[in-house]
Amino acid sequence: MNANRIVAHPSGARSERVHAAVLTATQELLDEGGYPAATVDAISQRSGVSKATIYKHWPSRTAVAAKAFGQLMAGELPLPDTGSTRQDLIEQVCRVSAFYASARGNVFAQLLAACVDDEAGAAYFREYFLTGRREAITTLWQRALGRGDVSAALHIDDVIDLLFGPLIFRRLTGHYDLTEPHARRLAETALDGLLTQ
Amino acid sequence: MNANRIVAHPSGARSERVHAAVLTATQELLDEGGYPAATVDAISQRSGVSKATIYKHWPSRTAVAAKAFGQLMAGELPLPDTGSTRQDLIEQVCRVSAFYASARGNVFAQLLAACVDDEAGAAYFREYFLTGRREAITTLWQRALGRGDVSAALHIDDVIDLLFGPLIFRRLTGHYDLTEPHARRLAETALDGLLTQ
Amino acid sequence: MNANRIVAHPSGARSERVHAAVLTATQELLDEGGYPAATVDAISQRSGVSKATIYKHWPSRTAVAAKAFGQLMAGELPLPDTGSTRQDLIEQVCRVSAFYASARGNVFAQLLAACVDDEAGAAYFREYFLTGRREAITTLWQRALGRGDVSAALHIDDVIDLLFGPLIFRRLTGHYDLTEPHARRLAETALDGLLTQ
Amino acid sequence: MNANRIVAHPSGARSERVHAAVLTATQELLDEGGYPAATVDAISQRSGVSKATIYKHWPSRTAVAAKAFGQLMAGELPLPDTGSTRQDLIEQVCRVSAFYASARGNVFAQLLAACVDDEAGAAYFREYFLTGRREAITTLWQRALGRGDVSAALHIDDVIDLLFGPLIFRRLTGHYDLTEPHARRLAETALDGLLTQ
DNA sequence: GTATAATCGAGACGGTACGTCAAGTCTTATG
DNA sequence: CATAAGACTTGACGTACCGTCTCGATTATAC
């Protein structure tokens, strides 16, 4: 989604070297000191790529960080497959909760925050991180649909946001701990609904 | 919640004048240009209160803005009372969704973002805005409990986060529009649960 | 000189306690951290005398520090009396040079600097420190006159400034070390004159 | 002297524009309102050079002002050349005395004061102003040596400090007026020596 | 003894400048 | 022509200290 908003950038062999160097450097910085450490100067210095070049490839610092973070997280958070839709979903909520509570979860929150006033960066974040996560859950959901565990009338966007939106809310406001029992109970409540049937 | 974390501030008549002037100025700036416009220098200039004094009363710019915003929003978003728990909750989700889509909703998002790297500010945000919102929903929920519409086994924190967390998620990532039909459908999904009974 | 420029201050027993407390505190602070440490806030806190009261007794921070310093130095730098005018003067120049090179000499320089933009403070500095020093040298000079070692045609102000002005110059600009041999040679040159007779 | 203590600054065409603009603006401000008027913000605004850039080129406000002042004074205070060593020296002392009594002499005093707590600035002041003055006098002295008017045994540093240190002392403490007759008498006293031969 | 005026402690406050930081743009020279 | 190097502008940050101010408490002295 919104891939078209992402700026075209120079192509060719040199570009690829530049891309790789910048992203690697950014990933290291994000892991070492979070988003605040990944200043454009620091990225430039560590990667050996000049600031001007960085800004030729990405529209903003946030965009660089978002892409680097997306790459960093690719492959992390694999989907559970217990055979039970209920268990799979609960397990995934717990995993994501644990992720938000981790150091990288903190970077995630910082990135989300940075995107609030940087729509270009936000597009990168969606493109290189969020979309991937949503697709993973969609896969899981389709499995559930195949089994008839869930209603085809539900919208996947609602499902995803109901399951994971609360965790993000908690991560950002800090009003509730991101512990496993809390995550589990939350998932169960989401699955069962709030109203007495 | 966390009220004790918030630093005591000087009291007395002079302090109250300072407080009022700063908060009013901040509210105006937030309404005019959002959080980015509410710089400490701008607040100082408009309120006639010196920067140093502002920093004596609040730990950070975010804290000032959080309190000003909380005051600004007090009384807004009144609770619906249709007689039906289901309708009340759906209606409230729609109202909050509309709020997030508004200019002040944007300020809310900016504030949330600013709190990510400012724990002191976050404490203010919880104290002067978030807690109030949660209490309002709690009231609504207690009414539902009285009617037997909902199970006493549910935790109010889960309820609140399930209903409103998704909206915040959508506001922050921009992956889904905050329109009334979307909000309504989301609320209904939350109320009914994700799994086929 | 210029004593008349010095502001009148409250009198009585309470005032004396205030005076003593402030000056003692200031002296301690000057000795501990030099003029920069003797901020009015620090003096107020250590002395237990409120800032407003301090400003009722002295026109400026510099004035307080100047008087405190003068008191601190009273009795220091006693006059030599070797029986030889030449030796006495040389010795005194050496002593003053050593003083300028010391920690308190540094405070002296800071005070001199502070007086540049504070005429009220400068008046105090003259009154409570400089005048005393000049009078001491004058005494020495009168002894020399009595012995016929020096010409009555010379002006004591010229004598004093010729002997000690160069040291201050060196202290302030740092272009020449304030060591004993340098001081001695300087004094000898001053005594003998620059031109071949 | 001490040139090596002064930080290297960026070079190239852009740097030179920056240097020139900053120094010119500072000179104007010094002439208009003395050292207190030459705040870094004011220099930045008038020169069109940003504060950050100024701090990349100079270690402190004092350093900027010192260099600007040195440039401002270059060429001022030309050496007298009457043919008589005695007259030349007396004349020069009178000129310097008049300078100290002037508006720019006041700036000189302020600069000297500012250097007391800013060694980096002091290095600039020596480098760009004081050294030049000393060299001028040295030239005059060498002429005198060539004529045999003065003893080769004297040290030029002593000579300079004896002649001009007293003036600075008087300028700073204000205990004696910087008038022409006073300056003349002082110079004569220095030339002839304090002791009866 | 008490009234009343001078004096004081406490510390909030406005003001001014400081020196720092990082984002993003621009220039120059190199390969 | 894409890059490296890094100078540069911009705008805000949080801090420091001055000297003034307000208020209520504490004296000292006059009655």
Image (cartoon, coloured by chain):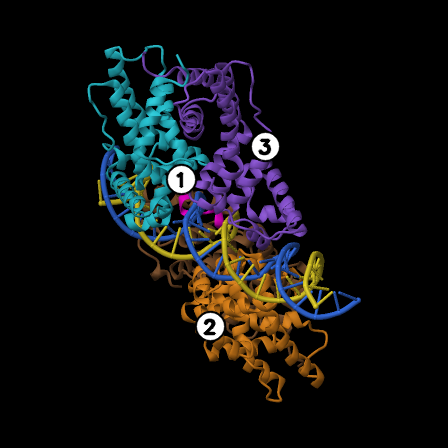
Chain colours: A brown, B orange, C purple, D cyan, E blue, F yellow
Q: Residue D30 placed where, x, y %?
A: 31, 44
Numbered disc 3: secondary structure = loop
- In the picture, the quarter occupied by the C terminus of chain C is top left
Mark 2 or 1: the one toward you? 1
User: Of residues A71 and A110, which is closer to you in this image?
Assistant: A110
State whether discs 2 and 1 lie on one chain: no
Q: Residue A181 placed where, x, y %?
A: 69, 61
Q: Residue C44 placed where, x, y %?
A: 61, 49
Amino acid at circle 1: Ser
Amino acid at circle 2: Arg
Numbered disc 1: secondary structure = loop
* Image: B3 above or below A62: below
Amino acid at circle 3: Ala
Q: Give the residue drawn at x 39%, y 62%.
A: A119
Query: In the rendered structure, which segment of residues is drawn in magenta?
Result: A35-41
* Few, some or many residues within 10 Å of mark 3 (<14, 14–19, 20+): few
Q: Chain of mark 3?
A: C
Residue B50 visible in the displayed image: yes
User: Of residues D43 and A129, which is closer to you in this image?
Assistant: D43
Q: Give the residue drawn at x 59%, y 35%.
A: C72
Question: Which residue in the structure is indicated by mark 3?
Answer: C74
Q: How many marks?
A: 3
Q: Chain of mark 1?
A: D
Q: For residue A144: magenta? A: no
Q: Which mark is residue B104?
A: 2
Q: For residue A36: magenta? A: yes
- Where residue B194 sits, quadrant-wise, is bottom right
* Few, some or many residues within 10 Å of mark 2 (<14, 14–19, 20+): some
Question: Which residue in the structure is indicated by mark 1?
Answer: D60
- Where residue C157 sits, quadrant-wise, is top left
